[in-house]
């Protein structure tokens, strides 16, 4: 497979330019030496919450878009018939629901990722040609002022031999939002469709994070930043091992103008949730 996603050192002076090149080339970037904290504690706490069924009283709210989505309710990627082999919890800090015993640490974790995201957004402002930016707002302001930034805790149960033929952990899709930061996951499996013809493995390391462009950023940058298709494949081995990931989806407030096609970001967001069968 093609090797194009080399890790970028967040602390080096050339981090911004390398990030820009990687996102333009693949829609993805891999970062090392990042400042995000608390991942180990988050995975320990939330794995217990999923496996001990602590989340059932926080059922997903189709209007607020927060709460717990069971594996029976899980997303069905556009163009596919099988639901993803996962369950997840949508957490909006400040107003979204969360079990009391998880809220403090999850909020700290969210803030740590959000601080890194603010820096990434500043770099994107500096890297985007002015004539390609369709929104009148800075990208940095869009995400630092947003109440719609979403931390999703994904739990992919161990597969064993009982899953439905043709189903995988996350089918081929693009992200809805502005951009996504995915701190360390507990195992590999993420792939990106390179140049629309080759699936490549996204490098996995417990101390690295992944950044990818979402559809909203592609829309309001006139396609300058590509939202690239990706998926999470089933493990070829270790089928008795589960997987967790915690993407933070940076997305603007509900009334933000994306483009003439999508003048309100909330309409774009809810249309995509409908397409996925979540609402």
Image (cartoon, rainbow, N blue to C red):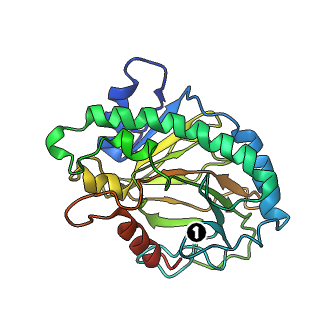
- Answer whether residue 210 is visible to the viewer in this image: yes
Of all residues shown, which one is farthest toward the right? 52
Label 1's element? loop
Question: Which is more toward the observer, 12 or 92?
Answer: 92
Image check: 63 left or right of 206? left
Of all residues shown, which one is farthest toward the bottom? 81
Question: Which is more toward the observer, 225 or 89?
Answer: 89
Residue under label 1, please give it: 168
Of all residues shown, which one is farthest toward the left? 131
Of all residues shown, which one is farthest toward the top? 13
Is residue 3 placed above or below 81 in the rendered structure?
above
Q: Residue at x 61, y 34 (%)?
A: 36
Asked where in the image residue 153 lies, by quadrant, the reply is: bottom right
Instruction: Specify few, some or many for label 1: CA neighbours under 10 Å numbering under 14, 14-19, or 20 or more.
Output: many
Question: Which is more toward the observer, 128 or 9?
Answer: 128
Q: Residue at x 65, y 63 (%)?
A: 89
Q: Residue at x 64, y 73 (%)?
A: 60
Q: Residue at x 51, y 79 (%)?
A: 279
- Answer whether residue 42 is visible to the viewer in this image: no
Is residue 156 placed above or below 20 in the rendered structure?
below
Image check: 198 left or right of 260? right
Q: Position of residue 56 (x, y in %)?
A: 77, 72
């Amino acid at each position: 497979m093609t090797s194009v996603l080399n890790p970028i050192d967040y602390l080096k002076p050339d981090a911004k330019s390398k990030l820009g090149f990687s996102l333009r080339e693949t829609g993805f970037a891999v970062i090392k030496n990042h400042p995000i904290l608390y991942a180990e504690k988050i995975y320990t706490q939330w794995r217990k919450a999923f496996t001990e069924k602590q989340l059932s009283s926080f059922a997903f709210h189709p209007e607020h878009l927060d709460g717990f989505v069971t594996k029976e309710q899980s997303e069905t990627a556009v163009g596919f018939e099988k639901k993803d082999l996962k369950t997840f919890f949508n957490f909006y800090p400040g107003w979204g629901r969360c079990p009391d015993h998880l809220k403090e640490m999850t909020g700290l974790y969210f803030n740590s990722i959000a601080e890194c995201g603010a820096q990434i957004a500043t770099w994107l402002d500096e890297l985007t040609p002015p004539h390609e930016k369709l929104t009148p707002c800075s990208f940095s302001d869009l995400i630092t002022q947003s109440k719609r930034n979403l931390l999703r805790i994904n739990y992919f149960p161990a597969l064993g031999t009982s899953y439905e033929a043709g189903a995988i952990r996350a089918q081929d899709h693009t992200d809805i939002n502005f951009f996504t930061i995915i701190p360390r996951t507990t195992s590999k499996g993420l792939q990106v469709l390179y140049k629309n013809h080759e699936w490549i493995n996204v490098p996995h390391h417990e101390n690295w994070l992944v950044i990818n462009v979402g559809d909203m950023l592609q829309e309001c940058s006139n396609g300058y930043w590509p939202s690239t298709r990706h998926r999470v494949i089933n493990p070829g081995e270790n089928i008795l091992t589960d997987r967790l990931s915690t993407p933070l989806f940076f997305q603007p407030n509900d009334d933000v103008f994306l483009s003439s096609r999508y003048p309100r970001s909330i309409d774009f967001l809810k249309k995509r949730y409908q397409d996925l069968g979540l609402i």
